[in-house]
């Protein structure tokens, strides 16, 4: 794939992941579902937060073009949106300012998306 195709793919992934994060954040209320909190939280981590962080890692390690400021801002916002949705599954409302870079560092250290989310949000408390 050429450089332009790679950049488009990264941009499309970022747009899709962060748009979904925004929709989920707007749709999910604190403790709103009958599904157990941990099960719902893990679904959001596996299908949203984790892929958002790995999109950043992939772009930083495999892309020939650096992420733009606007792409980084979208990834940061998406990271915080997914973590907000995760916390809401446990009945907690949070307002975070976590960078995708920080989330990636913790995820690489822990190698576990649940531990990463818990460390970044303190939800659920240990």
Image (tube, rainbow, N blue to C red):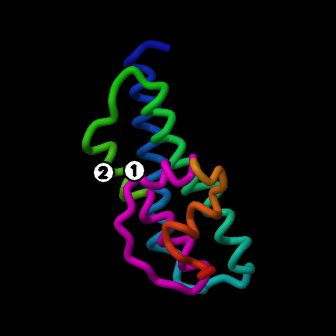
On the image, the x and y values in percent for residue 33 come to 66, 82
Q: What secondary structure characterizes most of the magenta part?
A: helix
Front position in the image: 72 or 28:
72
On the image, the x and y values in percent for residue 82 come to 50, 63
On the image, the x and y values in percent for residue 36 come to 74, 80
Identify the residue shown where x is 41% and y is 48%: 101
Identify the residue shown where x is 52% and y is 71%: 85
Residue 103 is covered by the magenta coloring? yes
On the image, the x and y values in percent for residue 51 come to 57, 48
Identify the residue shown where x is 54% and y is 67%: 119
Per the model, the C-alpha gap separating discs 2 and 1 is 5 Å
Say whether residue 49 is left or right of residue 26: right
Please tell me whether mark 2 sits on a helix, a strand or a loop: helix
The residue that disc 1 covers is 75
Residue 70 is covered by the magenta coloring? no
Query: Local crowd at mark 1 within 10 Å, few (<14), some, or many (≥20)?
Result: many
Residues tagged 2 and 1 counted as in contact (Cβ below 8 A):
yes
Front position in the image: 94 or 121:
121
The residue most toward the left is 69
Say whether residue 113 is left or right of residue 74: right
Q: What numbered label is drawn on residue 123?
A: none
Question: For the magenta stretch, what is the residue range?
Answer: 79-108
Please tell me whether mark 1 sits on a helix, a strand or a loop: helix
The residue that disc 2 covers is 73
Question: With respect to residue 116, does 2 lie above or below?
Answer: above
């Amino acid at each position: 794939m050429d450089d332009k195709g790679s950049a488009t793919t990264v941009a499309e992934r970022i747009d899709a992941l962060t748009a979904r994060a925004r929709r989920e954040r707007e749709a999910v209320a604190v403790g709103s579902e009958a599904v157990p909190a941990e099960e719902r939280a893990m679904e959001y981590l596996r299908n949203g937060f984790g892929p958002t962080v790995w999109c950043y890692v992939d772009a930083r390690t495999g892309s020939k073009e650096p992420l733009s400021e606007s792409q980084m801002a979208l990834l940061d916002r998406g990271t915080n949106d997914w973590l907000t949705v995760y916390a809401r599954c446990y009945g907690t409302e949070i307002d975070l300012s976590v960078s995708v870079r920080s989330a990636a560092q913790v995820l690489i250290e822990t190698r576990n998306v649940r531990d990463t989310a818990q460390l970044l949000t303190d939800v659920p408390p240990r």
